[in-house]
Amino acid sequence: MIVSQPVSPIPDGRRPPRRPRVLSILLLLGVVIGGCASRPGSLELAPTAGAVPGATPVIVLVATDRAPDGVQQVGYGSGRASLRYEELTISIPPGHEPGNIEWSGETARDASKSFVVTGRRTLDEAAFKQTIAMRIGTKGTAGLFAHGYNYTLTEAVFRVAQLSMDAPSVTVPILFSWPSEAAVTGYVADRDAAAYARDDLAHVLEILGGIRTEGTIALAGHSMGAWLVMETVRQLRLEGRDELIARFEVALAAPDIDVDVFRSQLAVVGPLDPPLTILVSKDDRALDASRRLTGGRLRVGAADIGDPSLEVIARRQGVRVVDISSVAASDAARHDRFVRFAMLQASETTQEGSPLGRVGKVGAFVFNAAGAAVASPFTLAGRALEGE
């Protein structure tokens, strides 16, 4: 008679080998952020033939402390260097779909179907400042954007161009690109790179703050770039640069910031005027992966707007927290809702100001899928922000 034998237990009670937890989370980050799609390379920053009829040119100014990557002297990698400045003209194709970036291949760039660079020039610091001042005039606006984790310079430049095209709220779009590894496994290295870039971002803010204009200057950071923005503003506050800070309207989109760190940042920065604006989505999968990678610590960008104590901390600290979970996301990570939200705000802006500006000075607010403020009932995220 054949008797089936039970599977022998692993000696000494040891468990089967498992994939390291950090590796699993990094793989998840790769799935939710980038998937398996090929990424644009440095050669896409090389100027190509002139734009086609119907295309729209967008000029983006760039300040970066990335080091050149050596690819035909057109690209920048993850190496760290001193600040460099450039002006790029990006052609947006006639059939552009709002919110999208129409990518081309490096060897087959077609201005009739995709974003292409049609002009590029290197600037020194004086020319960088002069160019901004000339374009902003006396009443224009400037917007400085700091990208997040896992970004190439090419991706960041084209994202700023897309935002400028689809949500034209600033006269002069400016990118601050810090030396991200642009790799899924580079999360920790990116955090160090963002810290490396604080002094350089502060210097760029000094340049902008020295330009005479009656218009506003917006300072926005996405994801890890939001951490960089908050750290830089905190540094300026500690240095007593209050007048410089007052020149900027600061916004954080899906900030990848530990709530305890954020609370300590707020304690130094204090209330801003206009108030600091934070865009949150509690179902942001990229921030959920970041939370698990950092020991389960809640990220500010994934705060639950339904917590009454969140409104309390928002009013106490002079912050405007805006839930945009209902706004459509174009990526599986649900990490880029700020793009669609910016477009909705621009389309709804009137002489009385944007819908965001009309909801009130500070507090917690919810926006629906159309980008309009709705009434909100005000769990744990708010109490975490309060330190309870």
Image (tube, helix red, strand yellow):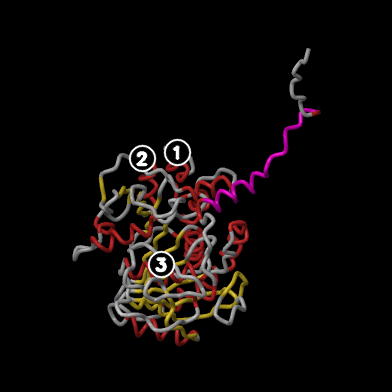
Q: Where is residue 216 in the image (x, y as percent from the top left)?
A: 32, 71
State which tag comes first along the sequence, 2 or 3: 3
Identified by mark 1, the residue type is Leu
Disc 2 from disc 1: Cα separation: 10 Å
Q: Which residue is at the front of the view, 381 or 18?
A: 18
Q: Does the magenta stretch include residue 318?
A: no
Identified by mark 3, the residue type is Glu
State which tag comes first along the sequence, 2 or 1: 2
Residue in the image at 54% along x and 61% along y: 150
Q: Where is residue 270 in the image (x, y as percent from the top left)?
A: 42, 58
Residue pointed to by mark 1: 380
Q: Which residue is at the front of the view, 372 or 377?
A: 372
Residue density around tag 1, few if under 14, some if 14–19, many if 20 or more, within 10 Å = some
Q: Does the magenta stretch include residue 16?
A: yes
Q: Which residue is at the front of the view, 301 or 378?
A: 301
Residue in the image at 33% along x and 64% along y: 97
Identified by mark 2, the residue type is Pro
Up/down of 284 relative to 161, above or below: above
Residue pointed to by mark 3: 102
Q: Nearer the viewer, mark 2 or mark 3?
A: 3
Up/down of 123 relative to 25, above or below: below
Residue 310 lies left or right of residue 149; in this view the side is left
The numbered mark at residue 208 is none
Q: What stretch is highlighted in magenta?
A: 12-31
Farthest right residue in view: 11
